[in-house]
Image (cartoon, helix red, strand yellow):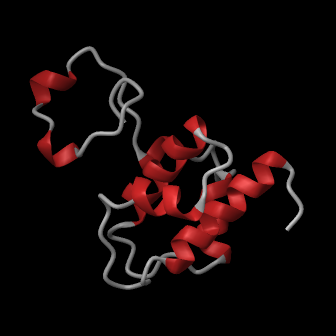
Amino acid sequence: MLDGNMVCSCLVMAPEAQGKKIETIEGMAKGDQLHALQKKFIEFAALQCGICTPGFLMASRALLAKNKNPTETEVRYWLAGNLCRCTGYDKIVRAVMEVAADMRGAAR
């Protein structure tokens, strides 16, 4: 995240980031306390090799910061820029939807 906006980190030149607020997966947990999304990804086995996981988690957090009640289609659209070859996406989407429901206090 660069100044609160999702960016493809591989496409941002270092001078473009100078003086900007940069958020990465390393700042998502608070010490030993995992973020709700990180917990649900583990619970739902929404990660396997782990290469895509940071991007999915950061994008999911950005989505839920803007929309606490996304539809499955909205989640899939929001995460479309992240590629996963291991999970098939369903577990990832279910984990995000579950966190959204928890944030709203919705019954499942």
Point out residue 58 in the picture as x, y percentages from the top left corner: 45, 49
Residue 86 vertical position relative to residue 26 in the rendered view, above or below:
below
The percent position of residue 15, horizontal first and vertical second, equals 10, 22
Residue at 27% x, 40% y is 7
Residue 17 position in % (x across, y down):
21, 25
Q: Is residue 91 above or below residue 71?
A: below
Of the pair 32 and 93, the residue shown nearer to us: 93
Q: Is residue 102 left or right of residue 61?
A: right
Q: Residue at x 44, y 50 (%)?
A: 59
Instruction: Residue at 57%, 64% (x, y): give it.
Output: 72
Number of labels in the image equals 0
The image quadrant where one finds the C terminus is bottom right
Q: Whole-percent x and y of residue 9? A: 22, 44
Name the side, left or right, on which 95 lies relative to 50: right
User: The N terminus is located in which quarter?
Assistant: top left
* Left or right for 43, reference 5: right
Examine the image and state in which quarter residue 81 appears. bottom left
Q: Residue at x 49, y 41 (%)?
A: 62
Quadrant in the rendering for residue 64: top right
Residue placed most toward the observer, 59 or 67: 67
In this rendering, position of residue 59 left or right of residue 96: left
